[in-house]
Amino acid sequence: MHTKFLGVAVAVCATVATGTALAHHSFAAEFDANAPIELTGTVTKVDWANPHTYFYIDVTGKKGDVENWALEMGSPNGLMRQGWTRDSMKIGDVVTVTGWRAKDGATKGNARSVTLSTGKKLFAGSSQASAETK
Amino acid sequence: MGRSPFSNAATGVLAVAMLMCCTQVHAQAAAHAAQHEAPAPTPRLADGKVDLGGHGIWNQPWITDFGKQVVGPDTKIPFLPWTKAMYDYNKSNQVAYDPQGFCLPPGGPRMFGTPYPSQFIQQADRIIVIFEGGAHVWREIHMDGRPLPKREDLNPTYFGYSVGHWERDTLVVETTGFNEKTWLNFNGTMHTDELTTVERISRPNRDTLHYEATINDPGAYSRPWTVAWDIPWLEGAELAEYICQENNQFLLELKDDFGNAFFKDVPTTSP
């Protein structure tokens, strides 16, 4: 529980310190700011494309069931300016993602941060973490 | 006051984290201030004119609410009833139908408040502004003294037709000939093709671009109004390619007011 709160505070901090995150469309039309998610899974696909980079992970549930989640990040340019490279995340890597779930309940979300298989944590350049929430 | 949802321990952890956060921000601010105690002076060209370019990019902020950027004696947006109604409607659906979400250019002053960087290419007879965002578009500002054409003589466009001149160290740009396919701002402030703008752009030091735009649209607002913000410089940084249209998944799931797919020919899988 404590780490969860710490996580929230650090995320707020990261947002303030990072400043501009790249944004293209309305976050609120697609994602639910009141539905935070934290997922760990195996990368199945990375779409390093505009206007938003997407990656997909297989998440194994408690009963052994596997769901494939689609996660939206910022534009490739925005991610690169925040320390990403196109090789930061590869198919087969196990990553942990925090973010917000899609409003329609689909296995889809807007990523806030990604902890890579190397342990390095990168800001995901999501629209939510930018001015829209101010 | 109800019982706090947080335990004392959790609140303590949160407080420490926030303190760490604030310390970090303050440290950054202090470093920033030290670095900027004597900001580099405004760069100038050989003829003495302010150089809006250089080896860097303008790191544009995301201005999501023009209502917070209004300057002057009255800081309210002077909506006409229809623009207020449309503003309220756009808010009611979380601005889902913002043209920029369709990868169309933000257009007008909003282009400088869209969070993708920009660069000025300054020539004697024209100034070109290249925008990384919206998507990878540019504006041409004629500086050769030609008059601003009449609106009715122009083909309406996203960025309109711009002529500029210098007033001391401020670049003054007049623009007319806008189409009606953009919003003035992300938050759903709309306009008509009667829109004209006067932008005042200055560079008080190397690291700051001061941007001001007066919006005059008698078809949408009861009087002219002015918005302003600063844009920081990123020395040494470069623009990158940004083609918005290649993977705009937002549109695949966009619904109309009745919950139907916005586009009838939406593919079942992304291209």
Image (cartoon, coloured by chain):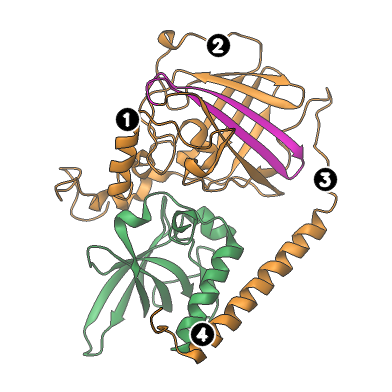
Q: CA distance from mark 4 to mark 2?
A: 61 Å
| Chain letter of the residue beneath label 3 in the structure image | B
Callout 4 amino acid: Thr
Q: Are marks 3 and 1 in contact (CB under 8 Å)?
A: no
- Chain B's colour is orange
Is residue B154 something that shows in the picture? yes
Mark positioned earlier in the residue sequence (4 or 3) = 4
Callout 3 amino acid: Ala
| Chain letter of the residue beneath label 1 in the structure image | B
Q: Would you call the spot at circle 1 few (<14 residues within 10 Å), some (14-19), or many (20 or more)? A: few
Evaluate whether label 4 is on the same chain as label 3.
yes
Q: CA distance from mark 3 to mark 1?
A: 46 Å
Callout 1 amino acid: Pro
Q: Which residue is mark 4?
A: B11
* Residue shown at the point (45%, 89%) measured from the top left: B7
Chain the render paints green? A
Q: Which residue is mark 2?
A: B148
Q: Which residue is mark 3?
A: B40
In this rendering, the answer to whether B195 lies above or below A121 is above
* Residue shown at the point (73%, 45%) measured from the top left: B207
Q: Is residue B195 magenta?
A: yes
Mark positioned earlier in the residue sequence (3 or 1) = 3
Q: Which residues are magenta?
A: B193-220
Q: Quadrant of residue B51?
A: top right
| Chain letter of the residue beneath label 2 in the structure image | B
